[in-house]
Image: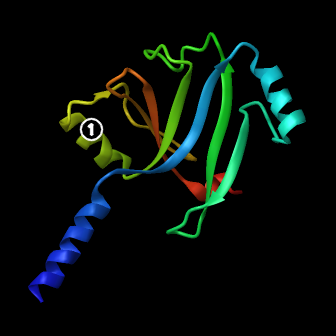
Amino acid sequence: MAQNESIQNEKNMSDKKGKVTGIGGIFFKSANPKEIKEWYSKNLGMKTDDYGTLFEFREIDKDEKAQLQWSPFSEKTKYFEPSQKEFMINYRVENIEALVEELKANGVTVLDSIASYDYGKFVHVLDPENNKIELWEPINDVLTK
């Protein structure tokens, strides 16, 4: 019986930890975001809007719809700073608050406070090569409406 309780306690602890669950977005700089969106729409059939396109998929373990945002940004954007890279990846996460605390404890540079919107929570961090990473804890049902 003690072993079962131990296993359950470990599961409860892991459920409370923050973690990445997938890719939430792919963002890249473009000389002309409007033209590049039009090219992808015309040539690859992507339905684009002001932000790019939103891909839907099903989460394997939850049987819920989820989203991945594809967005070209102006090559002059400051949104990727302090990174000098031409791209930024957005990762879908669970329990963003716990993850941010773990990252801080590990000495990871957290660039801002967690921001909350009706479609989820966001925060930005830097990896060891100074790539800016966006972490997103989505609210899927808002995006699927």
The outermost residue toward the right is: 42
Given residues 109 and 140, the one toward you in this image is: 109
Residue 3: image x %, image y %?
Answer: 13, 82
The outermost residue toward the top is: 76
The outermost residue toward the left is: 2
- Pointer 1: what residue? 103
Residue 127: image x %, image y %?
Answer: 35, 28
Q: Is residue 94 above or below residue 33?
A: below
Helix, strand or loop status at disc 1: helix
Quarter in which the N terminus is drawn: bottom left
Looking at the rendered structure, the kind of residue marked 1 is: Leu
Q: Is residue 103 above or below residue 17?
A: above
Q: Quadrant of residue 4?
A: bottom left
The colouring scheme, among rainbow, by chain, secondary structure or one colour, is rainbow
Which residue is drawn at the image coordinates 64% and 13% (left, top)?
75
Please rate how many residues cluster around mark 1, counting C-alpha atoms within 10 Å: few if below 14, some from 14 to 19, many from 20: some
Q: Is residue 113 above or below residue 141?
A: above
Question: How many labels, in total?
Answer: 1
19 left or right of 58 in image: left
Which residue is drawn at the image coordinates 18% and 37% (left, top)?
105
Residue 33: image x %, image y %?
Answer: 75, 21
Residue 100: image x %, image y %?
Answer: 31, 40
Quarter in which the C terminus is drawn: bottom right
Q: Is residue 83 above or below residue 18?
A: above
Given residues 52 and 131, the one toward you in this image is: 131
Which residue is drawn at the image coordinates 22% and 76% (left, top)?
8
Which residue is drawn at the image coordinates 83% and 21% (left, top)?
35
Q: Quadrant of residue 49?
A: top right
